[in-house]
Image: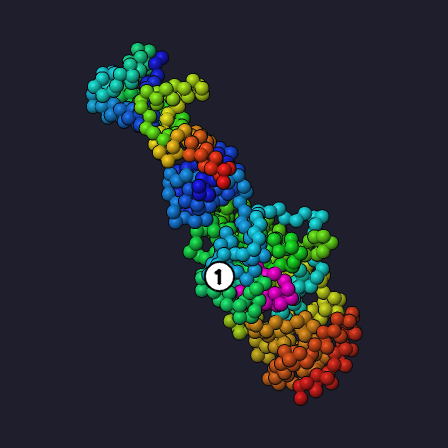
Amino acid sequence: MNEFSKILEKTGEIGYITSLFHSIANVSGLPSLRLGEKVITEEGEIGLVYGIREKDAEVLMFESANLRTGQKVARTGELFAIYGGEGLLGRVVDPLLKPLDQLGPIRGEKVALSIEREAPNIGQRVKINRAFETGWMIVDLLVPLGYGQRELVIGDSKVGKTIFLLDTILNQARKGVICVYVSIGKRAIDVKAVEEYLKENGVMKSSVLVVALANQPSPLIFLAPFSGMAIAEYFRDQGKDVVLVLDDMTTHAKVYREICLLLKRSPGRNAYPGDIFHIHAALLERAGNIRIKNREVSITCFPVGETLENDISGYIQTNLIGMTDGHIFFDVNEFRKGKRPAINSFLSVSRVGKQTRKVFEQHLANWIQLKLGEYKRALEIVQFGVELPKKTREIISLGEKIETVLEQFPGSPRPIWLQLFLVGLLRSEFWQEKPIGAMRKDLEKILEAFKKGLLFDLEREISRIKTIREFDQWIKEKIPVLKEILK
Amino acid sequence: MNSFFKNVFTKEDLISLKQEISEIQKAVFAQTGLLSEKAKSIAKKELLEYILEVEKKGGISFNPKEQFEFLENLKRKLDSLPVLKMVLAFSPPPATIERISQFLENELGRKIVLDLTCNPEIIGGAILEYEGKYINLSLAKNLEKILKTNE
């Protein structure tokens, strides 16, 4: 007896596919069907009940190769769930958690993971109070994040969003955080690059890649972020912090629009269905910092939004901005000017991350933001070709040096203490007399010393600092030591 | 009033009756006069009697358009009859089919059309499907159960 027959015997209800359109099937029969229930066809394909009408039900089918009208369908009596466990770590799977990496079946105990679980309630939630390091200076200093934050990563395509997220995964996976990367409707070659990056850097063993390729049925692509969240919830419930990347949600919205138009749901703004905000908000609400058995655990979520020519006023983009705790904006104009990372700190926001930083760290961030602001204004004056007063020249020089320090390339995350140390050097005018070229060389030597482990004492010392005065004093004391290193 | 689908027991009977009605529909616009006259050479006894009975009560006019619509309504009525799918291990003779149909009509209080399939693999008994409900009363299932408990 095959699986279909067993389920049919168990539930005692049968239905038939009456019509098919792409991967959406209308199924008659099955009188007790519920919304969100899993159904199975006689060929073993599974589907999710997405709408129930008077005479039939709308079912999203996740495989469409063998579907035909007249095919028998049985209800399972269970709400749709995916089955996974610890064995998912280090694996590349599709949204139904079937392996895609030729490494054989997923091993170990598997549990049912609900794709539409309720978000943690108010009582379970805890204020975000632990600093989250991405390893990228501009973010950690100017758009600080905390564990459990939902931070939108937004910008045009090919401006470095994915590499920023991969570096964040790299940095966090090395700290023992579980990382779930969900690829939504991307090309296979892009996903391969992500997999290889994680493998090369040795963090694949604490990561899970959930992949729905662009050529797969739209219900499967639609399911991907829900599967990713279900996996993240599983590991969080095991007492682990999790980073979840949803790359990207604008594609997800487009796929959901396609499904809803096929289902003949009323189109709203830009033909998106009316519940697109709810779908995304309900999903992201499941992330956060919560307390389980007197221990704080979190899902830090990075949904990605794609823009066109820096336009963040699009429908989905503004929705995503509205439902997250801030956004990191990758500016295509900055990218074209050669700035790396191309993050626009003035247009980026972190609504809860600042509370995770010490007072002197916030003071340093404010100082950088102030100086960068003065620098940008001074640059506008330069455009007129006027002779600049000494003060303006100093502002421009400092601004250039700040940008040089903030410049960072993929694969070189910097710990927060090193970031603070570098800002301290800027504040103490260590490089004031040096040209940019010489400063770059100094920076390279400092980073080299960091890689060799010569600066690790700084970490311990910096952790004791409480005020900006103490910090400035400490930097002054460290300058002779640094000069020795730079010799 | 006699039912025009009195002798419809199986899905095949139903399809055949619908075809009969379609043939009459084709003749409706070819001639003028009463519908019973037009159907005389095409319809079988029960259907013809039914048409005559309705005509007597003034239920069908001379207008071909209305006659066509009347026949269309008959087809719709046939389509709305509930179907019971039944898988048996043998092909039942017409008398058995009639008995099953009568039994169901008496039990459920409504006319049921049987959609019969023959599958010798079920050995005996029947598998029934009605309005989305499924019940396996086959001998094969019972034997499997017995064999499993004895293992």
The residue beneath circle 1 is A103
A165 in the magenta segment: yes
Q: Residue at x 72, y 65 (%)?
A: A357
Residue B27: where, in percent of width, then height?
A: 22, 23
Q: Position of residue A112 (x, y in %)?
A: 57, 48
Q: Main secondary structure of the magenta part?
A: helix
The residue under the point 48% across, 63% down is A191
At x 29% / y 18%, what residue is drawn?
Answer: B47
Quarter of the picture holding the C terminus of chain A:
bottom right
Point out the stretch of residues depicted in magenta.
A162-181
In the picture, the quarter occupied by the N terminus of chain A is: top left
Closer to the camera in the image, A438 or A147? A147
Q: Is residue A396 visible?
A: no
| Side (left or right) of A421 relative to B101 | right
Q: Position of residue A253 (x, y in %)?
A: 50, 52
Neighbourhood count class around disc 1 (C-alpha, 10 Å): few under 14, some 14–19, many 20 upward:
few
Taking depth in this image into account, of B69 and A21 the one nearest to the observer is A21
- Amino acid found under the numbered disc labelled 1: Leu
Q: Is residue B42 magenta?
A: no
